[in-house]
Amino acid sequence: SKTIELTDDAFKTNSLPFNSVLHLEKSYFFPKNMLIKELATVKEQFLEKILRERAILSAIKHYEVMHKEIVHFDKGNKIPYAGRVFDKDEITNLVDASLDFWLTNGRYSDEFEEKFARFLGVKYCSLCNSGSSANLLAFMALTSYKLGERRIKRGDEVITVAAGFPTTVAPIIQYGAIPIFVDISIPTYNIDCSQLE
């Protein structure tokens, strides 16, 4: 970072003492009488781009000071199933999307849906606001008449995990099916497949 001081003498010729470019990484001290004159105008689009970049860079710096932790995982370490896991890329996208004031679905979610569908080799992909909503939609799809005899109907028994989140069970009950609980295996905490029969 460099500081350049501009004196009154520099403006007697009515031009800047350099190539009329103000570099954003430098600080400038203008004489008081120059501040009443118009030094330059920039298009709103360019100004928005600069302000957006500054906001994102500030957010990244904040992340590096306040949140950056280097975590090394070894075999046997516990990994939390939930919590804030993010890096500078998430901070960048969060601030960028917020500056567009897209607080729900926007260009980032559209891009993700398109790329994720391509990754899965399917035609469509729709994001949900939560895993709970995703469970509900997935179960609802299993009750579709388009599945014919294979669809889940009221009174059908549905095997599910005994040690799971309530929203795994809620859709089963909502659609009138009966949850049948199977215990978990340790240390995976997933359903114990040996008990399915």
Image (tube, grey):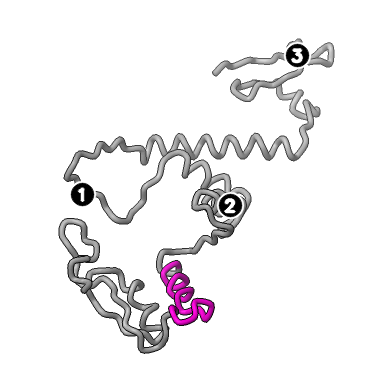
In this rendering, the label closer to the viewer, 3 or 2: 2
Residue occupying the point 61% across, 55% down: 106
* Lower sequence index among marks 3 and 2: 3
Viewed as shown, does residue 43 lie left or right of 145?
right
Residue 149 falls in which quadrant of the image?
A: bottom left
Q: Is residue 139 magenta?
A: yes
Is the Cβ of the residue at disc 1 closer than 8 Å to that at disc 2? no
Q: Secondary structure at mark 3?
A: loop
* Lower sequence index among marks 1 and 3: 3
* Lower sequence index among marks 1 and 2: 1
Q: Secondary structure at mark 1?
A: loop
The answer to which of 77 and 103 lies nearer the viewer is: 77
Is the Cβ of the residue at disc 3 closer than 8 Å to that at disc 2? no
Disc 2 target residue: 114
Mark on residue 78?
Answer: 1
Q: Is residue 130 magenta?
A: no
Viewed as shown, does residue 148 lie left or right of 54?
left
Disc 3 target residue: 19
- Is residue 41 positioned above or below 165 on the image? above
In this rendering, the label closer to the viewer, 1 or 3: 1
Position of the C terminus, as image quadrant, is bottom left
The answer to which of 95 and 11 lies nearer the viewer is: 95
- Is residue 149 positioned above or below 111 on the image? below
